[in-house]
Amino acid sequence: MDKDGTSLITLINKGEEYENTILVLKSLNNEIFGAYLSESLRIKYNDFYGTAETFLFTFYNTDRIRVFPATRTNDLYIYTDPSKIAFGCSDDNFSLSLEDDFSNCFTGTTVTYNNPPLCKEKANSITVVNCELWTLSV
């Protein structure tokens, strides 16, 4: 965020040329969590994309990474529009959602990833202090 600012559009533009990326978020309470994206980021209005290789992770309640793979119950893996990036969906709830200016992040439970909230900070209003998108080369 120090280098590229807090624009979701900038994040998506930088991520659209890479497959296999890791979105890492850090909360005000120093909690680390995020997602592995099996496809490149892109704006896709009113539709989800990605594959079941997409997963969520957190270090909440442990000193080791906890991974939540897709359950294949639905195919609601990644959602992006100019106002948010989100992962997983059921019962009108996202597993992880990051708003357009990174000011708010939300985490909840969905059948897509069968995950608990990814951090202990108030799950409906997490303050993001750092966001990084890492690319993996194969």
Image (cartoon, rainbow, N blue to C red):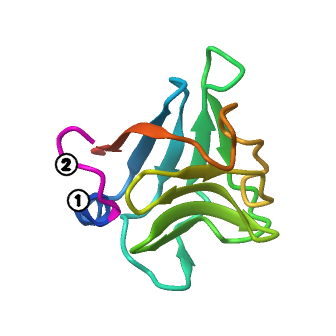
Residue 41, position as x, y percentages in the image: 37, 65
Q: How would you rate the neighbour count of disc 2 (Cα within 10 Å): few for under 14, some for 14-19, many for 20 or more? A: few
In the rendered image, which quarter is residue 101 located in?
Answer: bottom left
User: Label 1 belongs to which residue?
Assistant: 14
Residue segment shown in magenta: 1-8
> Looking at the rendered structure, which numbered label has been put on residue 50?
none
Quick check: 57 left or right of 37?
Answer: right
Residue 43, position as x, y percentages in the image: 38, 77
What kind of element bears circle 2? loop
In the rendered image, which quarter is residue 122 located in?
Answer: top right
Position of the C terminus by quadrant: top left
Q: Contact, CB < 8 Å: mark 1 with mark 2?
A: yes
User: Label 2 belongs to which residue?
Assistant: 4
Residue 9, position as x, y percentages in the image: 29, 67
Q: Amino acid at mark 2?
A: Asp
Q: Is residue 85 above or below residue 60?
A: below
